[in-house]
Image (tube, grey):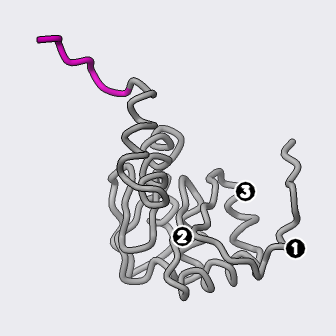
Amino acid sequence: MLVPDVTLDAVLDDAFDMIVLPGGGPGADRLDADTRIRGLLQRLSGEGKYTAAICAAPKVLASAGLLDGCRATSYPGVLDGMNLPRVDVDLKPVIRDGKVITSRGPGTAMDFALELIELLVGRAKRDEVESGLVRTEAQPAG
């Protein structure tokens, strides 16, 4: 069980650089049903901040109106089943359209995390973190 350091109500009016919604069907459904989350997403979007979601959670961004006119991705079938004529649903692992970042699921979580690192603290930090993950083939010496 995760125990938060602070309640959502206690930080609802605080300033944030980004909000990232975790995936998972039941959790995404709970986030989607919470009007405080929708309001927070809309406020941050209006302030030009980043909003991000992975797996089933992009549907929360859609419900908040943040995917209108955007290209986005999600866990297979999540966005497709929502009747979103103004959303260009794509199958790429991670999509950034302006200040909205979406990702497909558990298998794309590392790429999603690296994209968020780059947006928040720059390409150099992303490269530093990624190099320690040994995600690419070693190049032969010489």
The quadrant where residue 139 appears: top left
Q: Which three-letter amino acid code belongs to the residue tagged 3? A: Gly
**Secondary element type, mark 2:** strand
Which is nearer the N-term, disc 1 or disc 3? 1
Measure the C-alpha gap from mark 2 to mark 3: 17 Å
* Nearest-to-viewer mark from 2 and 1: 1
Residue 112: x and y, percent? Answer: 46, 49
Residue at 62 percent across and 53 percent down: it is 23
**In the rendered view, does 71 fall on the left or right side of 40?**
left
Q: Which three-letter amino acid code belongs to the residue tagged 2? A: Thr
From which residue to which does the magenta span run? 135-142
Q: Residues within 10 Å of mark 1 (few under 14, many from 20)?
A: few
Instruction: Quickly name the residue at label 1.
Output: 10
**Secondary element type, mark 3:** helix
Instruction: Quickly name the residue at label 3.
Output: 27
SS majority, magenta: loop
Q: Nearer the viewer, residue 81 or 17?
A: 17
Residue 93, placed above or below residue 28: above
Residue 27: x and y, percent? Answer: 72, 56
- Which label is found at residue 51? 2
